[in-house]
């Protein structure tokens, strides 16, 4: 019998990956396996780093948690891409702030 959610918590793709890996692949159903495959392919940083970046984006750049999570999930590489995630509230964000966010993300970006 499925458990009922008691509270809502927004998580990043890397955190989803970590959660599903902790269950063990042999215990996962088909949907969870697909989710793990997606998370493994599209995680831009590890779960611990993602959690740290979310907190810093919220504190340093005053982003909402939802905005910070989406930024981590995609790790944008241009001002236009960052603007997409911050335009949801129809607020105007200064270019200097967007540049600072990009510079901050560059510190954590995986080197390919």
Image: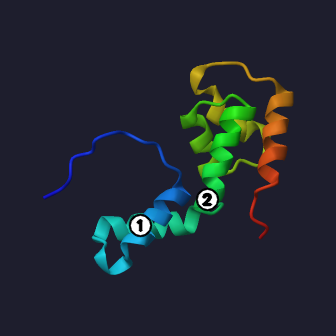
Which mark is first along the chain, 1 or 2? 1
Q: Residues within 10 Å of mark 1 (few under 14, many from 20)?
A: some
Left or right relative to 103: residue 28: left
Colouring of the image: rainbow
What is the distance, in whole Å, between disc 2 and disc 1 at their CAs?
15 Å
Left or right relative to 88: residue 95: right
Read off the residue under disc 2: 48
Read off the residue under disc 1: 20
Dot 2 lies on which element?
Answer: helix
User: Which residue is rendered at x = 39% and y = 68% of the image?
Assistant: 34
The residue positioned farthest toward the bottom in the image shown: 26
Q: Residue 93 in the image: state x and y as whole percent.
A: 75, 23
- Quadrant occupied by the N terminus: bottom left
The residue positioned farthest toward the top in the image shown: 91
Q: Along the line of sight, which residue is nearer the eye, 29 or 11?
A: 11
Q: Residue 82 in the image: state x and y as whole percent.
A: 71, 38
User: Which residue is rendered at x = 66% and y = 50% of the image?
Assistant: 52
Left or right relative to 19: residue 81: right
Q: Residue 91 in the image: state x and y as whole percent.
A: 66, 18
- Above or below residue 97? Residue 74 is below
User: Which residue is rendered at x = 37% and y = 76% of the image?
Assistant: 24
Residue 69 falls in which quadrant of the image?
top right
Dot 1 lies on which element?
Answer: helix
Q: Residue 75 in the image: state x and y as whole percent.
A: 68, 51
- Above or below residue 89? Residue 105 is below
Q: Nearer the viewer, mark 2 or mark 1?
A: 2
- Above or below residue 48? Residue 99 is above
- Quadrant occupied by the C terminus: bottom right
């Amino acid at each position: 019998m499925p458990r009922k959610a008691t509270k809502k918590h927004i998580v990043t793709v890397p955190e989803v990956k970590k959660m599903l890996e902790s269950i063990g692949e042999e215990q996962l159903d088909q949907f969870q396996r697909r989710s793990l495959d997606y998370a493994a392919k599209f995680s831009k940083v590890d779960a611990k780093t993602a959690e740290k970046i979310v907190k810093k984006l919220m504190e340093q750049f005053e982003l909402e948690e939802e905005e910070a999570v989406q930024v981590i999930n995609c790790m944008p590489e241009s001002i236009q891409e960052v603007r997409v995630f911050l335009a949801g509230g129809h607020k105007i964000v200064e270019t200097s702030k967007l540049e600072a966010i990009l510079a901050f993300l560059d510190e954590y970006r995986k080197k390919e």
